[in-house]
Amino acid sequence: VVESWSFLDTVESNFRPLVVIELAKGTKEETIEWFTKRIVDKKANGGAQLLIKPLVTENGVENIYLVGATHLRLLLGAETVGLVKECSDNSMRTFTYSSRKTFKDFADDNHNFLTMAECQYIIKHELENLRAKNEKMIPGYPQAKLYPGKSIVRRLLTSGILVQIFPLHDREELKKLRHSWYGQVKVGYQPLDDIRCYFGETIALYFGFLEYFTFALVPMAVIGIPYYVFAWEDYDKYVMFATFNLLWSTVILEVWKRMCAMLTYRWGTLLMKRQFEEPRPGFHGVLGVNPVTGREEPVYSSLKRQLRIYLVSLPFVCLCLYFSLYVMMIYFDLEQWALDYHKENESNFSSLMLYVPSIIYAVVIEIMNRIYRYAAEFLTSWENHRLESSYQNHLILKVLVFNFLNCFASLFYIAFVLFDMKLLRQSLATLLITSQILNQFAESLLPYWLQKRYNRRMKKRMCSQKTDRDLSIAEQINMEKEMGTYLGTFDDYLELFLQFGYVSLFSCVYPLAAVFAVLNNITEIYSDALKMCRVYKRPFAEPTANIGVWQLAFETMSVISVVTNCILIGMSPQVDALFPDSKMDLVLTVALVEHLLLAIKFIMAFVIPDKPRDIQMKLAKLEFESLEALKQQVRAFQMQL
């Protein structure tokens, strides 16, 4: 059934390995034979109609299989997944095999029409859509139950038979990308189109947002420096700075929507139709019938899920929030101790000791955030959400609520309970800088160092076995399968979200926050690029049209920042002196200004279109042409009748 694939022989020209499948050691032969047969079988017989060959080295078969596809099969797959490509007339249209000649750069012998990332995405889609027909179980594993319509790959993963599936790196293309991306220190834009071609739209869009956000912070940083140097204690001079900050936060988020639309239209994902979501791999329940598709699949009571959320998850999150506040109060005790110690000793050492509690607290915050993240993932998985989107939304909500309170509660307490602006500046600066250093170390430098150590050991082992250089692809696969798996852009967006909070929430107190954010983001671009290219396995491309729920999260943060900055300005001695007789007038004035600023924000958000005019026209034209084509099909059908 499966042809032998040996790197000691001449490589067949028509087979290009794109995706690696690793099965568990000791997987039964009947299971392997059945699975590989389903992969190579024709679509009409329920197969994926792909090419698969085992990796054979001098040590024999290692339960690693390479998957590829013919050029024709990939083109048909591109139509199935709804890829959007550029036509000869420069318009973007959904690719169809019948109209392939109308697409730009298409030729029957041009195997680069589809990017490698698109080819790997097509193969992943076909593998995930391999479904059980009449099988009741996976051959050789009676405990691994199947039912008609169940995804075979998902069952193999949850049963532990399939260890992992990952796309293979293209070493030559990766080398070129590394050089243009971070191989040279330069001031300029990232090669977003090249990143998109290699890693897909989701990752390219994250780096696009990171770059855009960094450039958007520059005006805040430039304006913040003179405010910090020349107007430290004059809070009335911060009114203009805070007002600019609030309008800036609205404008940059609205302009990003337009930039995002321009990028995703060029990449084709703005036009891609949303795929019907399948149940996520971890979802379980009793076998029933899906009322939408009519297919048999696991069914789980929504009432049970709601009970788990409100009776277990919600109390646990509240308990974690209480614990976070308890740790915060311990931090304030340490601050008081450090202050008392400084008053008693008045030395350089005691001055340094004033920063120690904030540094310790910043480290504790990072540790708590990471521990809570694991707990949130476990709880959200236990809630048994049917769809991946529902799972992600509940996870993001849990993590954002805890991270927001954990990172910012102490700052709110200092500002609005202790009324200590000097301590607020000190704590904000310490928390921001410490968290940035820790994140850079934990997310990029440490994984890179560990991966480099592993690669050195692996190369020594290969040399000791006296392997021929013809085994370079086998060596590459053995190295890549041990690399860490990139878990998505969640943590990267979360880091930017918290940074946005530090910059915008208390901007009128610490204008230098934007300066540190710009410096951090410049290094973040390089370190994130490094980890994508050198530390992690290549992730599968995931088409996306925007940054999803994170856009709403950033907009919510900008609304909260209006309230905090207005209250901080209202608390300043200069503003307080304007209302010596009635504090109620002060409160009403601050509330009025805050409402006016919010109104301006929402008006600006409404006035600035989410999509540029030319893209709106192109989308309207495509919709009109689709409706006309549908009408013609209906007329043709009616004439046949």
Image (cartoon, helix red, strand yellow):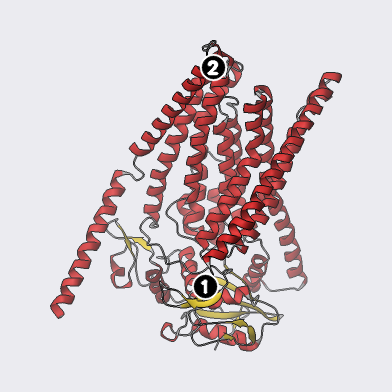
Q: CA distance from mark 2 to mark 1?
A: 59 Å
199 left or right of 351? left
Q: Can residue 188 be seen at all in this image of the molecule?
A: no
**Residue 141 placement: quadrant:** bottom right
> Which residue is the extreme one toward the right?
345
Q: Name the mark nearer the viewer: 2 or 1.
A: 2
| Residue marked by disc 2 | 583
Q: Are marks 2 and 1 in contact (CB under 8 Å)?
A: no
548 left or right of 231? left
Image location of residue 255, percent across then percent down: 41, 39
Image location of residue 428, percent across then percent down: 65, 31
Q: Nearer the viewer, residue 108 or 3?
A: 3
| Residue marked by disc 1 | 299
Image location of residue 321, percent across then percent down: 66, 45
First of labels 2, 1 by sequence position: 1
Type of amino acid under label 1: Val
Residue located 40% across and 31% down the image:
599
Q: Which mark is residue 61?
A: none
- Element marked by disc 1: strand
Judge the density around disc 1: few (<14), some (14-19), many (≥20) Cα neighbours within 10 Å. Answer: some
354 left or right of 318? right
- Element marked by disc 2: helix
Judge the density around disc 2: few (<14), some (14-19), many (≥20) Cα neighbours within 10 Å. Answer: few
Residue located 22% across and 62% down the image:
627
Type of amino acid under label 2: Lys
Specify the quadrant that holds the C terminus. Answer: bottom left
**Residue 422 placement: quadrant:** top right
